[in-house]
Image: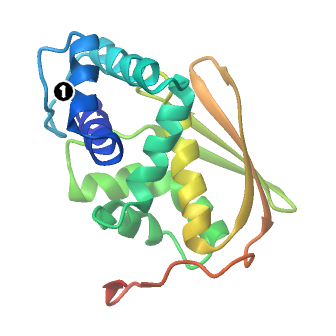
């Protein structure tokens, strides 16, 4: 999983802030690599150092960098594969939420060696949900928050997200769906792909 996150961070920083910033991140993190393969395994401490270096150089918190990364993973038009995988979850944002527990298995169909965090959704009714994620990476909950925020926009839903304190290493996200038809979502056609 760390290779995927490292590569996503590399692409995100290069595209948003330029290759020079990425090189400064690599140097500050004392990384032996300046590029990452998404399906390879890297030391978790290296990922942590890269995120910390990026946050320091951007003058942001680690949490902000990770949440922006999660948003970018879904919203960037050149990387529509993850968005398509997520949109297979249903026609509404609530359908999507209810499909999240199946996401690690669906992802493994495409990438057998990919390990995603185990997800558990609890529906409290009245548009309130709790999503628990057993993270493989410190701060993975923030990546998931960014991903959820981007998917809410994709569906046109108005959603409030709150990352509660971790409980025994499990990230806990409180989700309140205020309006599923708040705005027009991005076009999506399961049969024809994305527009």
Choose between 73 and 99: the one closer to the eye.
Answer: 73
Q: Which residue is mark 1?
A: 41
Q: Quadrant of the N terminus?
A: top left
Query: What residue is rendered at 13% in x and 32% in y?
Result: 35
> Residue at the location (66% across, 34% down)?
172
The quadrant of the image that shows the C terminus is bottom left
- Indicate the position of residue 53 as horizontal and vertical percent values: 37, 17
Query: Does residue 40 appear anywhere in the picture?
Result: yes
Q: Is residue 175 left or right of residue 114?
A: right
- Give whichever of 164, 54 is nearer the camera: 54
Please state the horizontal and vertical placement of residue 75, each as a whole percent of the image.
44, 61
Q: Residue furthest right?
A: 126
Q: Position of residue 77 (x, y in %)?
A: 34, 67
Judge left or right: residue 132 versus residue 174.
left
Q: Mark 1 Cα within 10 Å, few/some/many (few <14, many 20+)?
A: few
Nearer to the camera, 77 or 107: 77
Residue 29, can we see it? Answer: no
Label count reads 1
């Amino acid at each position: 999983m760390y290779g995927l996150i490292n590569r996503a961070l590399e692409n995100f920083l290069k595209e948003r802030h330029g290759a020079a910033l990425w090189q400064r991140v690599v140097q500050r993190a004392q990384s032996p690599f300046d590029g990452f393969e998404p399906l390879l395994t890297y030391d978790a401490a290296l990922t942590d150092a890269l995120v910390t270096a990026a946050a320091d150089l951007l003058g942001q918190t680690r949490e902000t960098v990770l949440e922006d990364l999660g948003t970018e993973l879904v919203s960037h038009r050149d990387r529509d594969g993850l968005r398509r995988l997520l949109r297979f979850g249903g026609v509404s944002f609530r359908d999507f939420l209810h499909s999240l527990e199946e996401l690690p298995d669906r992802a493994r169909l495409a990438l057998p060696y990919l390990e995603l965090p185990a997800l558990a959704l609890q529906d409290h009714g009245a548009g309130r949900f709790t999503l628990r994620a057993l993270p493989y990476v410190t701060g993975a909950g923030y990546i998931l928050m960014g991903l959820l925020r981007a998917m809410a926009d994709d569906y046109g839903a108005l959603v409030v997200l709150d990352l509660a304190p971790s409980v025994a290493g499990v990230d806990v996200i409180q989700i309140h769906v205020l309006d599923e038809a708040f705005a027009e979502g991005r076009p999506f056609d399961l049969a024809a792909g994305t527009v």
